[in-house]
């Protein structure tokens, strides 16, 4: 498939992958081989650094048999792109030259090659990506032995705060271990993430990576029920300002800028805004009004097991202040320890919750794939109860536009243009 053919026929999950890379900046696509992760990365690359400096690291086989033979001849990579094998990158004089350049994007293809915490390539990638705005990993086999493999890739790519957490600190703090002996030497074997940190760990993996397996089905039908719960909304100054920001963005602006504006409006309609402290560079929250979705939950939630799906971490933390019997742990929820399970929109894969038949979308993501995959955690073969799905939406706001995109499986560009048109004409 050529790049032009990809642009005309991309799958919804591939567009989700593009958005993840552009919005999170340091993130990974974990697609099974053949599911098409290269072109989403190239599209994201073209959006954020078409005129920038790009470094692509991969294996010799991948560079020779895929990048140089299939991608380079299409002339679709940014002009100032360097392709280099992993084995070459760790050698002088290449290593020193790479370190001297301020890269705009670093793409590590076959990033399972940096799942070690102390290999030469892992250390080099960690140093390079620490000062790079966009750093992405691609692989179909992210885990070889344990969750530590994911930690190492996140650490070496400086994903979120993982780049600042040393290997020994991660193991000592978050992992269950056991001691064994081999050849007279004591070896510390990692069993897995301890229960205390499991839920947060899984949420972080979902936030900063996208997993696509062979059994993904992009054509699952929507439920026949009408899940919308329309709530009244009086626009705040912050929300109106966010909408004005959308109107002021030109149609030719990058997808990243458009996404940032949409996200800001989505936050504002739910009563808060994220902002970055200029001194500490840490993200903080400015909550300026109560979200009446909480009042709806207080009135309508029963003691029956219920999954509440949210978009932003602030949504989760706000819900937690009102509902004490909630958990992020899927295991605790299935055991009945807690009757409310909080799941981020991206945590929509590979687990069975058919013991529950109620799901409420507190805030919704832009992706149809994530929506339908999440619904299928409870609406699945073996479910013997009627399934009740609710999607909470504020009337005549950006949330209705996002929901319409999800229902109609439209692309993000369609959402932006429709939203801008409705704001301008409204």
Image (cartoon, helix red, strand yellow):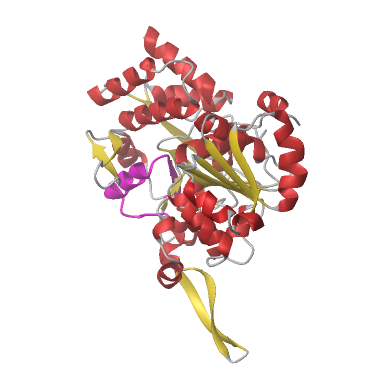
Quadrant showing the C terminus: top left
Residue 294 falls in image quadrant: top left
**Residue, x 57% and y 23% (percent of image)?**
410
Q: Position of residue 401 (x, y in %)?
A: 45, 22
Looking at the image, residue 243 sits to the left or right of residue 376; the answer is left
Q: Position of residue 424 (x, y in %)?
A: 38, 10
From this viewpoint, is residue 306 visible?
yes
State which quadrant residue 42 falls in.
Answer: top right
Could you say which quadrant of the image residue 11 lies in?
A: top right
Q: Going by the picture, which residue comes out furthest to the front?
A: 93
Point 44% across, 51% down: residue: 130
Q: Is residue 131 left or right of residue 213?
A: left
Question: At which x and y percent is residue 149?
Answer: 56, 62
Can see residue 382?
A: no
The single residue placed furthest to the top in the displayed view is: 425
Q: Does residue 158 belong to the magenta stretch?
A: no
Q: Quadrant of the N terminus?
A: top right
Residue 287's spot in the image, x, y percent?
Answer: 24, 37
On screen, 426 above or below 74? Answer: above
Q: Is residue 305 magenta?
A: yes
Q: Tell me the residue at 49%/56% (across/down).
A: 126
23 vs 403: above or below: below
The residue segment tinted magenta is 304-328
Q: Residue at x 53, y 28 (%)?
A: 406
Looking at the image, which is closer to me, 124 or 17?
124
**Closer to us: 82 or 287:** 82
């Amino acid at each position: 498939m050529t790049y032009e053919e990809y642009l005309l026929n991309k799958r919804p999950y591939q567009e989700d992958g593009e958005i993840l890379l552009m919005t999170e900046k340091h993130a990974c696509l974990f697609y099974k081989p053949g599911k098409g992760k290269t072109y989403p990365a190239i599209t994201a690359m073209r959006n954020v650094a078409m005129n920038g400096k790009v470094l692509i690291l991969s294996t010799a086989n991948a560079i020779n048999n895929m990048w140089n033979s299939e991608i380079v001849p299409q002339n679709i990579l940014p002009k100032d792109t360097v392709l280099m094998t992993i084995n070459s990158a760790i050698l002088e004089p290449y290593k020193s030259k790479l370190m001297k350049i301020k890269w705009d994007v670093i793409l590590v293809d076959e990033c399972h090659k940096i799942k070690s915490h102390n290999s030469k390539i892992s250390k080099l990638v960690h140093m390079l990506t620490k000062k790079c705005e966009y750093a992405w990993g691609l692989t179909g086999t992210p885990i070889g032995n344990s969750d530590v493999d994911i930690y190492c890739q996140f650490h070496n790519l400086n994903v979120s705060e993982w780049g600042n957490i040393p290997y020994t600190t991660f193991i000592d703090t978050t992992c269950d271990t056991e001691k064994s002996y081999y050849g007279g030497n004591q070896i510390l074997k990692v069993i897995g993430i301890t229960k205390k940190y499991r839920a947060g760990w899984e949420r972080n993996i979902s936030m900063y990576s996208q997993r696509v397996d062979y059994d993904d089905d992009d054509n699952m039908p929507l439920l026949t029920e009408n899940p919308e719960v329309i709530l009244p909304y009086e626009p705040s100054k912050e929300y109106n300002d966010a909408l004005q920001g959308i109107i002021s963005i030109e149609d030719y602006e990058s997808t990243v800028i458009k996404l940032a504006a949409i996200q800001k409006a989505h936050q504002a309609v739910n009563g808060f805004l994220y902002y970055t402290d200029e001194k500490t560079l840490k993200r903080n929250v400015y909550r300026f009004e109560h979200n009446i979705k909480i009042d709806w939950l207080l009135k309508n939630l029963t003691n029956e097991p219920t999954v509440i799906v949210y978009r932003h971490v602030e949504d989760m933390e706000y819900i937690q202040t009102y509902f004490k019997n909630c958990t992020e742990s899927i295991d605790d929820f299935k055991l009945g320890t807690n009757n409310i399970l909080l799941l981020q929109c991206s945590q929509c894969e590979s687990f069975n919750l058919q013991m529950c038949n109620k799901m409420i979308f507190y805030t919704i993501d832009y992706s149809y794939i994530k929506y339908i995959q999440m619904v299928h955690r409870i609406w699945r073969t073996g479910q013997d109860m009627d399934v009740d799905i609710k999607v909470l939406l504020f009337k005549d706001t950006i949330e209705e536009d996002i929901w319409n995109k999800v229902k109609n499986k439209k692309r993000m560009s369609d959402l932006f243009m429709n939203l801008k048109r409705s704001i301008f004409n409204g």
